[in-house]
Image (cartoon, rainbow, N blue to C red):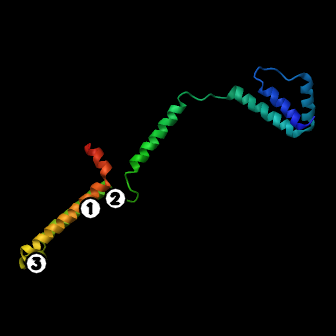
Amino acid sequence: MNCTKVLDLVYEYSENKEGSKLPLFNQIKISLHTLFCQTCAKEIELLEKTRTIMNEDYFPVSTRFEDSIMAKINAIEESETEESYAIPGGISTRGWVIAGLVLLVSLVTAFFGLDFQNVADESGVSFMLPMGILIGIVLTTYGAFFVGSHLKELTERFGL
């Protein structure tokens, strides 16, 4: 008897769920073959171990297993969407606010410098108008960049 026939017999009776046993003559043939063929003996031994594990040590899937996995996947997706608001290597909201305050203070205090007073006295109103427009443009541009880069955070915070 060759290896293929022996293994076919073993598999055929192992797949039978009715619990019928292998006929005695076939058991003798398989035993004699496995006595001389170590490959088939190992294959049949692995099959028996697998059958034992599946019948005795197998734990069925928990009914809540799918729910817990899906909850973890949803939590990961939510954390990824929250993290997607922040640009990697970008400036945080606190950094934007601090930089904006420094910019505002530096533009406002420019009017109190000694050189500014001399230039303003010589030029008059024709110098004050462009300075006011420049300060307005700088602050408006900075504010537009701040709002544009933090649009999602601001709409969530103020409920817009």
Q: CA gap, disc 3 to disc 1?
A: 28 Å
Lateral position of residue 40 relative to residue 120, left or right: right
Q: Please name the amino acid that badge 3 sits on.
A: Val
Q: What residue is disc 3 on? A: 119
Q: Residue at x 81, y 31 (%)?
A: 11
Residue 73 image label: none
Q: Please name the amino acid that badge 1 sits on.
A: Ala
Q: Residue at x 86, y 36 (%)?
A: 41
- Image position, residue 74 (x, y; %): 46, 39
Foreground mark, 3 or 1, reads 3
Q: Please name the amino acid that badge 2 sits on.
A: Ile
Residue 156 against residue 139 in the figure, above or below:
above
Q: Residue at x 19, y 63 (%)?
A: 104
The answer to the question of whether label 2 and label 1 lie on touching residues, with beta carbons closer than 8 A, is: yes
Residue 134 against residue 86 in the figure, above or below:
below
Label 3: how many residues lie within 10 Å, few (<14), some (14-19) or many (20+)?
A: few
Q: CA gap, disc 2 to disc 1?
A: 10 Å
Q: CA gap, disc 3 to disc 2?
A: 36 Å
Label 2: how many residues lie within 10 Å, few (<14), some (14-19) or many (20+)?
A: few
Mark 3 or mark 1, earlier in chain: 1
Q: What residue is disc 2 on? A: 91
- Image position, residue 68 (x, y; %): 50, 33
